[in-house]
Image (cartoon, rainbow, N blue to C red):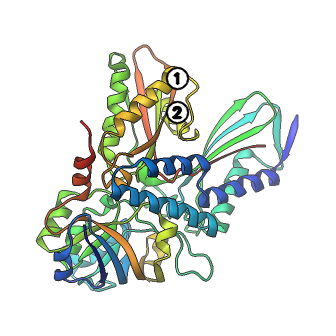
Amino acid sequence: MREIKYEDLVKSVKAMVMHTATHLPEDALNALKKAYEEEESEVAKSVLKQILDNAKLAAEEERPLCQDTGLAVYFVKVGEDVRVVGGSIRDAINEATEQAYKDGYLRASTCDCFDRHNLKDEVGYNLPAVIHFDIVPGDKIDIEYAAKGGGSENVSRATVLAPAQGKEGIKNFVKEVISAAGPNPCPPIIVGVGIGGTFEVAAKSSKHALFREAGSQNPVAELNEFEQEILEELNKLGIGAMGMGGTKTVLAVHIEKNPCHIASLPVSVNVQCHSSRHSHITL
Amino acid sequence: MAEYKMTTPLTDEDIEKLKIGDIVYLSGTIYTARDAAHKRLVDLINEGKELPFDLKGSVIYFVGPTPPKPGEPIGSAGPTTSYRMDSYSPILIEHGQKAMIGKGKRNQAVKDACVKHKAVYFGATGGAGALIAQRIKKAEVIAYPELGPEAIRKLEVEDFPVTVVNDSYGGDLYEEGRKKWAKA
């Protein structure tokens, strides 16, 4: 069995979290540049320019791209033939998250649901991290990470449609959610759609869909086509960058589909703001 | 769409000039407050107590910045979503607040208060926190330090760029902009 040292795991994850807060990844940058070039509204174009200037400045000066440095969300695939020596994987990820938020001067946005206080009343204490584990064959640990902001999370929705509503029903639900969201989630956005499974599987899929490279092809032809169809519809809404009116409301639609119950058609829409801060490492 | 340079505190005459889509470069003192601080301000008004700053002509920025790096006045400081302040803003406007800076839609009560008491809602670019922070020259926590990022800060700003989203004539840039670009 392959072994990874606890300290090495902490070090790698911490570096990834700190870098992600200040450097917008290539896929998001390219999607924003394309939107800037294609946008017809002058007002929206000037907003997109500010967003691109902000990304440049943040990277150069290593400043957080946004004051909402998110909840730390991880999808972790652990190979059956690897183990961490010196501590648990969960503890390592939480420790790395805590160190990164403290040393990177990132905002701790985690609080208790009722009294709304930080759980430790400490600068940089942004725990617990949200970690979704999966066990897979192999001897690697694969970690996908995103710093997920609250504004775009607030407009996200899930439902269970009747099977008869089909693809048309799914498209209408996505449109309803994005139309109601308007300027609030900081468009241009990326829309993650989870279809099928059970209620919670759809929600989790819609989150995971946001981790895909923006603008990449869905490997399933039918889904790829459906993504393009929904994207086109959503960009007719006219919301535009920061809701000022324009043709580029959505940068990409990403769909993940799962088999579901014969009685149900669960659909979840998870929204990602334009500051799509995500990373991926394999150890 | 016009461009203006304005210095706080803002007056009725300043507000009357502004129409949706106008760009304003603000200089002077502005105050930060989010959900928790707004609740406390409104509680103080209801109890007839003194506020930690003068509301008259004031500009309140909805922001919870990242912690500053050593030697810097503030961390990244872009706007947060404004609707969470909708239940408080009309009361503050009634008591003299002239402008709010945030992002996202406001409800009808806020828009009505802007018309009735001559106030505006400015939009700043969400997710441009590093860029916006460059226009903030000084920052000082003046109330509720226990709220951390949600404490009330007094900021000195220079040419802080904002766009008029709701003016004192009932206009709404989000609605107008969307109408203009929507395709059936």
Instruction: Locate the N terminus of chain A and report the quarter of the image it occupies.
Output: top right
Q: Is residue A8 above or below residue A105?
A: above
Task: Indicate left or right for A224 with B158 as reference.
Answer: right
Q: Position of residue A189 (x, y in %)?
A: 44, 46
Report the chain holding disc 2: A
Tell me: B61 left or right of A128: left
What numbered label is drawn on residue B111? none
Badges 1 and 2: C-beta atoms under 8 Å apart? yes
- Report the amino acid beneath label 1: Asn
Residue for badge 1: A258
Q: Which quarter of the figure has residue A172? A: top left
Residue occupying image coordinates x 37% and y 17%: A163
Q: Badge 2 is on which residue?
A: A205
Can see residue A207? yes
Q: In this view, does B74 lie above or below A215?
A: below
Earlier in the chain: of badge 1 and badge 2, it is: 2
Which three-letter amino acid code belongs to the residue tagged 2?
Ser
Q: Residue B108: where, in percent of width, then height?
A: 17, 58
